[in-house]
Image (cartoon, helix red, strand yellow):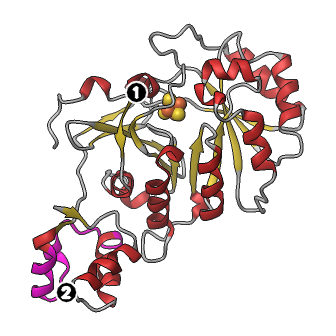
Amino acid sequence: MKKLFGNTLDELREITLGHGLPKFTAVQISDWLYKKNINSVEEMTNLSKKVRELLSAEFEIGVTKYSRVQVSNDGTKKYLFPAGQGKFIETAMIPDEDRNTVCVSSQVGCKMGCLFCMTGKQGFQGQLDAGEIVNQIRSIDEAGSISNIVYMGMGEPFDNLEQVLKSLEILTSEWGYAMSPRRITVSTVGIIPGMKTFLEKSDAHLAISLHTPFDDERKNLMPVEGAYPISEVIREVKSWDFGRQRRISFEYILFGGLNDTPAHVRELSRLLHGLKCRINLIRFHPVPGTPLISGTEERIAEFKDALNGEGILTTIRASRGLDIYAACGLLSTKELVGKESGQ
Ligand code: SF4
């Protein structure tokens, strides 16, 4: 059965026109899908019974309930969603005083192979479609109270560009969830062609995983550096007019004794000179099979102060959901493949 959920309004129009239905039927369907959160075609009560039967013969709604949820001591939740063929993805929900941030996955596993990441170790197992991405927002317990969305879960969003852009269109369009793109951040390792298309087509914020300003060191941590060196990634974003509303930030995981020296501060300052941005420092949470270690709290604070001293707005991101492996770099569903049932 084909899915209705995850189609843009234009795609719904193609479907309705293809079935000889009036144009406005597509708007009615998008309303039921994205504003009224129905679970079956039968519930679309402003469509005639005949139209509902016509749609039901070919389509299901296509939303999926999570199959498991874990709750951390700090309130962070980690949801497990089935992604077809015995595969799973994880979604983190991070509550804060005045906001609920959802961290969504864009792929099952990841091809990028970053040395410090459990998802990278899992390898790539498949793409998510737009419906499966938006379902992570629609089908969690906090669906009605989400304030922010970050594309920082499993996968590299610009390695699944078309579906990620579609999901952003559904989330931000008036006919969809009508969320402000200023409440959404998409994070990338720096896949330049995808990043350019995203910057042209979406108004959501951009985050770039930086982790070190030095090429050789970065290549070691992130193989993508070989294809898209960070200097070129930054040259590209410097050529872009971000306007006043749109934010660019850099994610920087601190590895003890590796990327936290004064030389790193100086090179970061040189590299980011002239770019209005922010650096988010992230504590490293050791993953099995890497030689990398965490830095001390003291060193992290010193590094932050040194960057702020260079005029780069720098903050330390609080680690959330560590006890349930929901923190940055710890999402993995490798051991679950084929083990959990689809519901
Ligand atoms: S850090 Fe992101 S891009 Fe790198 S392997 Fe993990 S999920 Fe993929």
Q: Secondary structure at mark 2?
A: loop
Residue 45 in the figure: left or right of residue 196: left
Q: Look at discs 2 and 1 and give the one toward the viewer.
A: 1
Q: Amino acid at mark 1?
A: Gly
Residue under label 2, please give it: 47
Residue 84 or residue 276, whichever sits in front: 84
Task: Tell whether position 54 is magenta.
Answer: yes
Q: Is mark 2 within 8 Å of ligand 1?
A: no
Residue, disc 1:
123
183 left or right of 68?
right
Residue 291 vertical placement versus 335 (above, below): above
- Does label 1 point to a residue whose CB lies under 8 Å from ligand 1? no
Q: CA distance from mark 2 to mark 1?
A: 44 Å
Q: Tell me which segment is drawn in magenta.
A: 34-55
Where, by quadrant of the figure, is residue 198 drawn? bottom right
Left or right of 177? Residue 313 is: right
Whether residue 254 appears in this view of the structure is no
Q: Is residue 17 above or below residue 182?
A: below
Q: Earlier in the sequence, mark 2 or mark 1?
A: 2
For disc 1, the neighbor class at 10 Å (few under 14, some 14 to 19, many from 20) is some
Quarter placement of the N terminus = bottom left
Which residue appears at 67% of the width and 12% of the height?
256
> In the image, residue 17 lies at what x, y percent?
29, 85
Give the label on residue 24, or none.
Answer: none
